[in-house]
Image: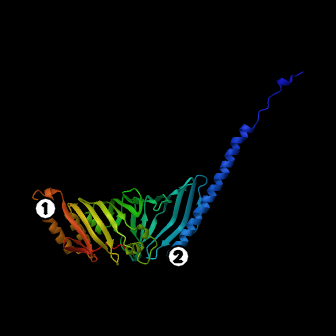
Amino acid sequence: MTDATDAPVRHSRKGLIIPFAIVFVGLALWTGWWFYLAKQVETKLEGRIARLEQSGWTVRHAGVTTTGWPLRARVALKHVDVVAPSGHAVAAPEIVAEANAYNPTKWVVIAPDGLVLTRGAKGKTAVRAEAIRMSVHGLTQRWPNVVVELAKPVFTALPDAEPFPLARAGLVQFYMRPHVAGSNTPTDDVDVLFRLVDGEGRPNGPVEGLTQSGRLNAQVEAVIEKARALKGADTKGLLSAWTAAGGRFIDMKGQLEAGESRTFLSSPALSADDKGRLEGEVFLRAEKPLAAIVGLAGAQQGGSLDRAAAARAAAAQEATKSPQGGTGAEGQGVDLVLNFKGGRTYLGPFALAPAPQLF
């Protein structure tokens, strides 16, 4: 006869079921959140496209797909074509945007198959690169942080288009972030930075002449005033309304390296006239600028650069050489001023070319 105390003990299985139940409930909640996020992304994208079209833009694509469950939100648009009222446009076989589902305020946008840029009346330029990507984060801020990067891009002008100044580059980067005043409070201004590494000009073009068939490296930063006016675009382009509102580039500084020439530049303020031509002064500290000026003049046969004026400016610069073979005081370089006024670019008293046009 078996004693009741010797009966086997039945253990509760709740200890096994509860963890699985918690995981199941968590997964269900997370899946619900993911589908809600995906729907919100698609809704906001449709709303943004509708607002652009109401402003005169044309946006075409072959459909939107959202994937990436469970950890990512991945939005893909096929055969994208975005045309501004100014005629400038960007097209791509595919645009992909990704974000972590747990941090949807930071997105990375890529163009895996390259882009085609339309520069208004100048025509279309194809851009192929090892990577074309844009990072956007801080979407809840007044101005988000934006980084655009092209790794080893190659620029090819399509038939009937004007040649693009660059043939290729090692790296092109653009940064934008909110400008912070001395009191550490954000303003309506934004900081921008542009970097070009190992740029190569097209054959017989201005960049090739400027660099004496070498490489162009540039880094320029500035503050954009009244950035709030950078919205929408009329037939003159994005910067037209901003310029009309009194927008300026201020506190500009940078460095250019063209072949053996090196130039440090700065400007307190640059603006544009009602035709989009740049206005203001850029102060230059140039080392060995003669070869770059002569090369630029030689590359502009039949172009807009006044070669005779460039030659006179080069001769004036040559006259500043010291007996030791340097340029300027103690062979450290020469101070120059580029003046944009009346739609022209002046180097000292010499009018070299039309002023750069923003729109």
Q: Residue at x 18, y 59 (%)?
A: 333
Residue 177 seen by the camera = no
Dot 1: within a 10 Å radius of its alpha carbon, few (fewer than 14), some, or many (20 or more) residues?
Answer: some
Q: Nearer the viewer, residue 102 or 204?
A: 102
Which amino acid is tagged 1? Lys
Q: Residue furthest front?
A: 183
Left or right position of 75 against 266: right
The quadrant the C terminus occupies is: bottom left
Q: Looking at the image, is 347 positioned above or below residue 23?
A: below
Pointer 2 residue: 54
Q: Nearer the viewer, residue 306 or 159?
A: 306
Which amino acid is tagged 2? Gln
Where residue 261 sits, quadrant-wise, is bottom left
Q: Residue at x 17, y 71 (%)?
A: 312
Whichever of callouts 2 and 1 sits on the residue coming sooner in the sequence is 2
Pointer 1 residue: 321
User: Exactly how many numbered labels are in the figure?
Assistant: 2
Nearer the camera: disc 2 or disc 1? 2
Q: Nearer the viewer, residue 259 or 251?
A: 251
Left or right position of 128 against 271: right
Where residue 279 sits, quadrant-wise, is bottom left
Q: Residue at x 83, y 24 (%)?
A: 5
Residue 330 placement (x, y as % from top left): 14, 56
